[in-house]
Image (tube, rainbow, N blue to C red):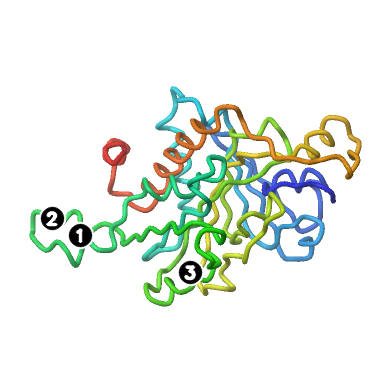
Amino acid sequence: MNIRTDLAVEQVEAVSPQTEGIHQQKRGEAFRITEIIIDDDRHRHTLGKGKGRYITLEGNSLSKFSDVYEDMAQELAAELKLLIPEGEILVVGLGNNDITPDALGPQTAAKVLATRHLRDELDSEEEAFLTSLRRVSVFSGGVLGQTGIETAEIVRAICRELKPAGIIAVDAFACSDISRLGTTIQLSDSGISPGSGVSNARKELSEKLFGVPVIAVGVPTVVDMHTIVRSLTGENPDNKLPNMMVTPRDVDRLTERASQLIAFGINLALQPSLTFEDVRGLF
């Protein structure tokens, strides 16, 4: 299958939604939600996706504020809760903050409430509410070209020290359908290979590597030009022609606002005692 995308819904559409071992459910109000469950790894070669749950939330452009923004944040949080285990969580922002289409992860991480240190730092009765929050750590360490270290190696070292119950990894994705560019959020419990959508895959972040569930969250911010041509014409472009990654004109605003929405969802999912207004006060 000659398709470049990180979205499971697009890969399933390209093969067949009725493929054995693949199940779909539709739901949602603020978003159009498609949940895909892949029973095993038999389709990994054709789909590029292994066993797991893949939840796609589709709506209008995430670069624009919506009248149902609170509903979107609450629905995203509810979907995240289906995947996140109980216990301490490590949130990892993947990507390069110096390259706007790749800055979703670091910008989201900067907006997630870190609470792991509170119980050690606060002990008065007046601060009891803060110390009752779920323990959350946040990390964003750049990319291999900046650090010389694979992100997976850094995260594995952190996991050995912190021993979290699960990891939430946020990254920018690639898609093949222009209509999903900057309008879609994908959640999955199968881990993530940073850069795979732009043919620059790094070492996978997965439960197999870390020993705890890895929840991947992302928004497509780029689409491959050859993929655009193929989707519009049905023909394969000449591979000798130069290729490029295309991103929306307002990608800076998309990255800023999509990261805020994802951070809203993560904070609400991890800290159910906080209201939407509480979380908004964090920004």
Q: Looking at the image, is 160 positioned above or below residue 220? A: below
- Identify the element where label 3 is drawn: helix
Give the image location of residue 224, x and y in percent: 73, 40
Give the image location of residue 235, x and y in percent: 91, 36
* Label drawn at residue 131: 1
**Residue at 52% over, 74% down:** 211
Give the image location of residue 39, x and y in percent: 70, 62
Q: CA distance from mark 1 to mark 3?
A: 27 Å
**Residue at 67% over, 47% down:** 7
Residue type at numbered disc 3: Ile
Give the image location of residue 264, x and y in percent: 39, 42
**Residue at 55% over, 45% down:** 102
- Identify the element where label 2 is drawn: helix
80 vs 138, left or right, is: right
Q: Are marks 1 and 2 in contact (CB under 8 Å)?
A: yes
The number of numbered badges drawn on the structure is 3
Image depth: mark 3 or mark 2 in front: 3
The residue carrying mark 3 is 154
The residue carrying mark 2 is 127
**Residue at 78% over, 41% down:** 243
User: Considering only order in the chain, which callout, 3 or 1, is on the residue closer to the N terminus?
Assistant: 1
Q: Residues within 10 Å of mark 3 (few under 14, many from 20)?
A: few
Image depth: mark 1 or mark 3 in front: 3
Residue type at numbered disc 1: Thr
